[in-house]
Image (cartoon, coloured by chain):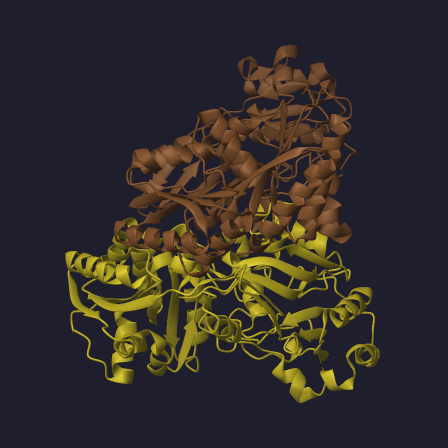
Chain colours: A yellow, B brown
Amino acid sequence: MNGVNQDMLPDQLHQALAAIVGPDRLLDVDNDRFTYSYDGSFLPLVPAHRPDVVVFPRDVGEVVRIVRLCNDHRVPLVPRGAGSGRTGGSIPVNGGVVLSLERMNRILEIDRKNMMALVEPGVRTMDLGRAVEDVGLFYPPDPSSWTVSTMGGNVAENAGGARAVKYGVTKDYVLGLQVVLANGAVIDTGGKAVKNVTGYDLTHLFVGSEGTLGVITKILVRLISKPKAKKTLLLMFGSIDDASECVTDMLSSGIVPASAEIMDKTSIQAVARFRKVDIPVEAEAALLIDIDGPQILLDDQAGAVTEMARQHQAVQVSVAQTSAEADELWVLRRTMGPAVAAIAKNKIGEDISVPRAALPEMIRRLGEIGRKHGLTIAVFGHAGDGNLHPSILADLSEAGARERVDQAVAEVFRAALEVGGTLSGEHGIGITKKPFIEEALGKEGVRALRAVKHALDPNGILNPGKIFE
Amino acid sequence: MNGVNQDMLPDQLHQALAAIVGPDRLLDVDNDRFTYSYDGSFLPLVPAHRPDVVVFPRDVGEVVRIVRLCNDHRVPLVPRGAGSGRTGGSIPVNGGVVLSLERMNRILEIDRKNMMALVEPGVRTMDLGRAVEDVGLFYPPDPSSWTVSTMGGNVAENAGGARAVKYGVTKDYVLGLQVVLANGAVIDTGGKAVKNVTGYDLTHLFVGSEGTLGVITKILVRLISKPKAKKTLLLMFGSIDDASECVTDMLSSGIVPASAEIMDKTSIQAVARFRKVDIPVEAEAALLIDIDGPQILLDDQAGAVTEMARQHQAVQVSVAQTSAEADELWVLRRTMGPAVAAIAKNKIGEDISVPRAALPEMIRRLGEIGRKHGLTIAVFGHAGDGNLHPSILADLSEAGARERVDQAVAEVFRAALEVGGTLSGEHGIGITKKPFIEEALGKEGVRALRAVKHALDPNGILNPGKIFE
């Protein structure tokens, strides 16, 4: 896969691409190349990561011609949405062509009868969300980047979000794809028949494949009916274990919250300082719970959740009575990122996913890892599904800090694997987690991934250097 | 893939396999070979479909040795569960070894805290269902074969069922697999972390791959909390369109039934004759609706559904007040298979899946196809997700009947594709639908499937002759 060795000079490449998209939809001056050399990850900027050219195709025909050109001349091709990814998935580490899908951003159809939408990859997740809400429908996946991230990027990384505990992640909504393969062939996978066992499930092979198996040019997603009502509860506990057990009790009892966000003491206090929120001194953990559904159910469920929280020695229970109050409670979670960032020079945010029951153990281990390396680790995340975002706080300008952080990050990943979890819940592997993939999947597991990659992209032109070596 | 050409004599193969599983877990006399030469499909019996040997491994170590042996000597290997499949997926069309997973039938773990179960492939679906219900949990997929079918077979075919409209199909519950690859390597995919984007989604590549990519030796499924209560409604309509529109209205309004089974006039009348049920003469279609969830919701929803049915000119509405009454209503659907079979010498049951909104159009076309070929086609199926089971009724002993049926079946598949649907909703492709796969997926689509197959099974030993040529 590292054998990509382009046989075209930059000038020839430029000319051939200009012949496809025209001079207006092509960038190759230094400033622009710099702009497309990084993403939403915390990676140091590297000149080698600059693409030779950035192109903006407008339709699948142009994509086919670009892919063929790159395949014929062994030019690395890196598909890109909004570049908001967290693991370097859209960084052109070997240069070559960045294929930006920003201009393919039309919502092609909202099919109300079948409750589906067909979109181009450049559509912003938020724009799809709003368009379908306008007709009473709902697209549940809500990655926190949703105001900027694109559907193509969400599909490529199998993006999650806070609502995953009840509604699942991106892959649970993708019914079909149009994909341009490395050889330029266009295939359609899946379709509007929701039950479909015709051949291997290529749709879900492409979802989460981080642009390494094909270029996604159309996405068919299913929608659901918009939940009628919502209720928000903020619960404070004396220990992480109590908070975690409370979530388990809810799910066992059949109450599946739309969101169940957990925050540790460091995180809560960071927000308290940032926003002057009043937090009980004995609060070691907070749970922010959204329940949604028919109004008739919500009061009942809110009562049951309150009772469960009391059984787990909750030190404070707040139930929002209005949507303004709910927004007020959500401030805690919504300002978490900047609030935590404000208490340290640098914040290195991670994404791990563990079995839900292993959550207290994982949080305990995060504390140990932090203490060992003299680092504070703030923890928040999605308790309902065991997906945590530990934030390592450091001052990277200090001597040795980068090394300590790197060691801590490696230990965080290993701890996640040891408790039965995995490297990534919703951010993908990209380049930041690539060194750990073999520990997670085993030699034979990675060999199987490679075999699939080689089958669909024998020349290794598609987003090379990602997921595995 | 057709290059399987075993280089072992039957005697040598027998000895080598006996050395692995011992003489007691190996069958190779004619009677036994016959027993393992067919499945639940309607295929004529063919002597060439008899396996050379049937083996019953007890653990993954034995499976590895059997797979290696077959791979080394290019012996076709056909994994098999209960043999209840409908499309010939477990038939050893090239002979070779049938690897029966019947003896690997332990429920290894029911993890109540994480709400998951780990099972061996030979566990019967019903046995898992009952075991988890005993602890208040619920495994929703309910293929009608569930009293005999195995979890391994369900995963291999991505089995569906009546509850799919609300709860999804088998793939929606599989979180991880242990798989023995064609080269004998054992890989673990997925795991107990429910959000998992570590590498390609191999789990869902194996689900529905019909035993052609690896032998599944462990299955990790997620469970949900058992629904608190259930209510059953039987609605009779003056037209298929009205019935179909009523389902669309329910879903749009946010009422997602646990089941929404549709039956056409031929089907209803067949049952009426079979069980002496009273059916209004003007009933052209019936909907059998289950709604489930918290008790507090059900009366409300039942009222809303009744009102929607009235708006669509329902000619009869029955709401079960007790579970005995509910069972009585379900008789209509449960005796559908035998009742329809009883009105003709032969019943050729099919499985197609179309966009839900295309259901009336598809049923209209089924009528046309039947009339054209002088055949009655009874239609019932899962209206909530557009998955229909047309039953072609014929007397195959009549001259030319087989040909007329074959033509009708081909036209049924084409019609499904024309209305935007697909060849199979829950039965797989196997050998019966293989001739149509290229029409469904296109040349390039099938080429992509073949590339994946070749990557994971380069010698083509795993269940050869299935899905595609």
Residues B13 and B116: in front is B116
Figure label count: 0
x and y percentages locating residue A126 in the rendered image: 49, 75
Residues B33 and A365: in front is B33
Does residue A272 lie above or below A303 as drawn? Answer: below
Specify the quadrant of the image occupied by residue B4: top right
x and y percentages locating residue B264 in the rendered image: 54, 40
| Residue A411 in view | no
Residue at coordinates 34% horizontally, 51% vertically from top-left?
A: B302
x and y percentages locating residue A206 in the rendered image: 62, 58
x and y percentages locating residue B361 in the rendered image: 63, 51
Which quadrant of the figure contains the N terminus of chain A? Answer: bottom right
Which quadrant of the figure contains the C terminus of chain A? Answer: bottom right
Specify the quadrant of the image occupied by residue A10: bottom right
Residues B197 and A134: in front is A134
Q: Is residue B6 left or right of residue A437?
A: right
Q: Is residue A108 left or right of residue A58?
A: left
Q: Is residue A274 left or right of residue A206?
A: left
Specify the quadrant of the image occupied by residue B232: top left
| Residue B79 in view | yes
Residues B290 and B452: in front is B290
